[in-house]
């Protein structure tokens, strides 16, 4: 936290294929060791598989899946008691991404695009 002033949050530029900032943030959170091209290859391969299986727009299906996984409440532990509080609106998306990747990375034996 700075002593003076206000830090302006940086906007993530939209994705080049779908034109969505949600897709770009998802790819950025998938990226390991700065390998963006690998994360893009995995994500776009998964989107092609979604489009083939559902015969519907893959971006619409992706947005629906993101909405279903968003958490509303989180547990905050104090010195004596744990209590449940609401998520701030900024941290809902990042918590949902962490949950999705936790389940994805713990599933061995399949390619990441199929998980």
Image: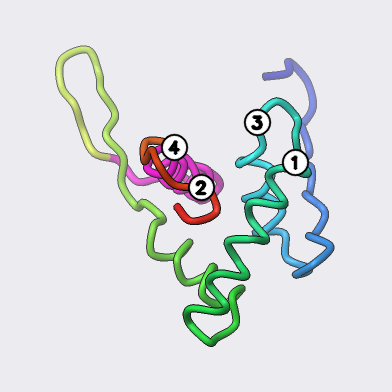
User: Contact, CB < 8 Å: mark 3 with mark 2?
Assistant: no
Q: Distance between the residues labelled 2 and 4?
A: 10 Å
Q: Badge 1: how crowded within 10 Å, few (<14), some, or many (20+)?
A: few
Give the residue number, with chain letter if any, for mark 3.
32
Q: Nearer the viewer, mark 1 or mark 4?
A: 4
CA neighbours of label 4 inside 10 A, class few (<14), some (14 to 19), many (20+): few
Nearest the camera: 5 or 106?
Answer: 106
- Residue lying at the far left of the rendered structure: 81
Q: How far apart are marks 3 and 4 (CA)?
A: 12 Å
Nearest to the eye among marks 3 and 1: give it: 3
Place of residue 81 in the rendered image (x, y in percent of width and height, measured from the top left): 15, 22
Tell me which residue sits at (51%, 47%) in the image.
Answer: 111
In this view, the residue farthest toward the front is: 109
Residue 50 position in % (x across, y down): 53, 72
Q: What is the span of residues highlighted in magenta in the rendered image?
A: 85-104
Answer with left or right where residue 72 lies relative to residue 21: left
Q: Residues within 10 Å of mark 2 (few under 14, many from 20)?
A: few
Which label sits on residue 39?
none
In the displayed structure, would residue 9 be above or below residue 113?
above
Q: x and y percent of residue 15 in the render? A: 79, 60
Is residue 19 found left or right of 22 in the rendered image? right
User: Which residue is identified by label 1?
Assistant: 9
Asked if 83 appears above or below 24 in the picture, the reply is above
First in sequence, mark 3 or 1: give its number.
1
Residue of label 4: 105
> Depth-wise, is mark 3 or mark 2 nearer the camera?
2
* Residue at disc 4, secondary structure: helix
- Work out whether residue 102 or residue 84 is closer to the camera in this orientation and state it: 102
- Which of disc 4 and disc 1 is earlier in sequence? 1
Residue at 73% x, 18% y is: 2
Q: Please identify the dominant SS of the magenta region.
A: helix
């Amino acid at each position: 936290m700075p002593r003076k002033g206000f830090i302006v949050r940086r906007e993530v530029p939209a994705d080049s294929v779908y034109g969505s900032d949600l897709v770009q943030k998802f790819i950025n959170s998938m990226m390991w060791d700065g390998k963006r091209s690998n994360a893009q290859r995995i994500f776009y391969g998964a989107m092609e598989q979604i489009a083939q299986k559902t015969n519907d727009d893959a971006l619409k299906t992706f947005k629906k899946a993101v909405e279903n996984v968003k958490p509303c409440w989180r547990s905050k532990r104090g010195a004596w008691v744990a209590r449940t509080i609401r998520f701030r609106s900024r941290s809902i998306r990042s918590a949902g991404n962490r949950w999705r990747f936790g389940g994805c990375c713990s599933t061995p034996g399949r390619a990441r695009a199929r998980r």
